[in-house]
Image (cartoon, rainbow, N blue to C red):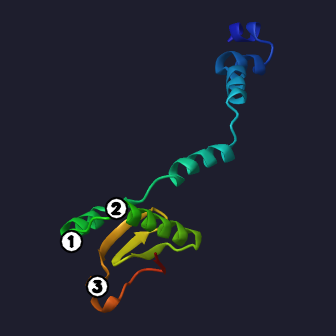
Amino acid sequence: MNKISNQFASIEQVTDQYLNRKSTDTAVSQNSISFEEILKQKQDVTGSSELKFSKHAAMRLEDRNINLSEEQSERLETGVRKASEKGIRESLVIVDSLAFIVNVPNKTVVTAMEQNESDDNIYTNIDGAVFM
């Protein structure tokens, strides 16, 4: 105990010596990126992600021998973007004769079918529709 009291004049000197407070302060100031900047960077990365297909939707497309052309895929993505802009969370997106149920916030196609396959053309559990 006497050694500590003889070597250090104040508690600040002890904390500086043993907790490296000065070095962490300089590290924080050197890497001073605001939370807002980090959030924007993360949103840019996730915001640019393309449309995904759930396993179920992929199996439906394969079982029904449905192949999307590049133009149809682009229209589907445009429809999802428009649904997102309107605040739709679960959307029916119609592209030509194909119907897609899409979870808009996750940019994931949940299921896909030919439009005429739906019984009585009734779609449930959606809060909006986009016709492309």
The amino acid pointed to by label 1 is Arg
CB under 8 Å between discs 1 and 3: no
Q: Position of residue 129 (x, y in %)?
A: 47, 80
The quarter of the picture where the N terminus appears is top right
The mark that comes first in sequence, 2 or 3, is 2
Q: Is residue 126 left or right of residue 99?
A: right
**Mark drawn on residue 80:** none
Disc nearest the viewer among 2 and 3: 3
Q: Which residue is mark 3?
A: 116
In the rendered structure, the answer to whether residue 35 lies left or right of residue 53 reads right
Question: Which of pointers 1 and 2 indicates the residue nearer the eye?
Answer: 1
Q: Which residue is mark 1?
A: 64
Instruction: Check the image and name the residue furthest to the left.
Output: 63
**Which amino acid, mark 2?**
Phe
Between residues 31 and 24, which one lies in front from this camera angle?
A: 31
**Amino acid type at image mark 3:** Asn
- Residue 71 against residue 27 in the figure, above or below: below
Q: Secondary structure at mark 1?
A: loop
Q: Considering depth in this image, is 43 or 100 the residue closer to the camera?
A: 100
Residue that numbered label 2 is attached to: 53
Give the distance between the C-alpha atoms of the residues marked 2 and 3, in whole angstroms.
21 Å
Helix, strand or loop under label 2: strand
In 3D space, how far apart are the residues under numbered discs 1 and 2 (Cα atoms)? 15 Å
